[in-house]
Amino acid sequence: MGNVKASRWIDCHEYLVKEFGPRCDEKILADLSPEDQAVFQKEILPFQWLDYGAYLRYVFAADKVMGKGDNNLVALSSRYTARKHFSGIYRIFISVASPQFVLKRSARVWRQYFDVGTIETLEAADKHVLAKLTGYPDIPLNHDLSHIPFMEEILTMCGAKNPKGKHPKCQARGDDHCLWEFHWE
């Protein structure tokens, strides 16, 4: 299983604590397996790698026990995480760049947050980007429920209006690559 930078979980956790209070972890952890509980009961530092499957199970458990179980909390925490990760000087850079420019460079961004997989931009047209992820055969199922809102938020920060993402092909569903489509007004 691949790993995600722990800073992604730290920002997600920060969002959950702001929304539901510091005791929300007790409820979330109670919904996880003992193995996943052990991951999140240790000190987690931003520069560490964290099992991506465990991260997603934590986020989905939070949605189930703190939210409505409709994945809305997954999306909200992903959007918050994107805003946190692209703040400061990055926020200034993103705000003056076009969505196509930023998404064409998504391969560099991907490797900052994930230790496996390669993103390639297949098409970057006006108000549309098509990207392909390869080399992550054991990517967790439903990873798109976290990834799409994260990318939609980045597009919004670039000035895209009403960005919408789709994930028509997925390595977790047996395809040889993941395919991402993003459209905006």
Image: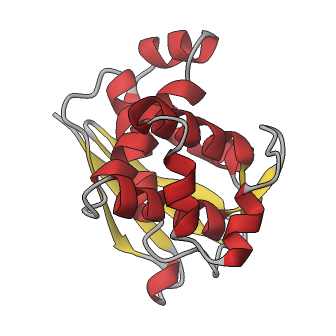
Residues 100 and 73: in front is 73
Direction from residue 152 to residue 47 in the image, left or right:
right
**Up/down of 91 relative to 69, above or below:** above
**Up/down of 70 relative to 123, above or below:** below
Direction from residue 12 to residue 63 in the image, left or right:
left
**Up/down of 181 relative to 86, above or below:** below
Picture residue at 58% right of the left edge, 62% below the top: 29
Picture residue at 48% right of the left edge, 66% below the top: 143
Residue 28, x across and y down, in percent: 51, 59
Residue 139, x across and y down, in percent: 59, 74
The quarter of the displayed image where residue 124 is located: top left
What colouring style does the render use? secondary structure
Direction from residue 129 to residue 45 in the image, left or right:
right
Picture residue at 44% right of the left edge, 11% below the top: 96
Q: How many marks?
A: 0
* Residue 127 visible to the viewer: yes
Pick the quarter of the image with the N terminus.
bottom right
Residue 4, x across and y down, in percent: 69, 55
Direction from residue 50 to residue 121 in the image, left or right:
left
The quarter of the displayed image where residue 147 is located: bottom left
Residues 40 and 96: in front is 40
**Up/down of 144 relative to 172, above or below:** above
Pick the quarter of the image with the C terminus.
top left
Picture residue at 19% right of the left edge, 35% below the top: 162
The quarter of the displayed image where residue 2 is located: bottom right
* Residue 180 visible to the viewer: no
Residue 148, x across and y down, in percent: 38, 52
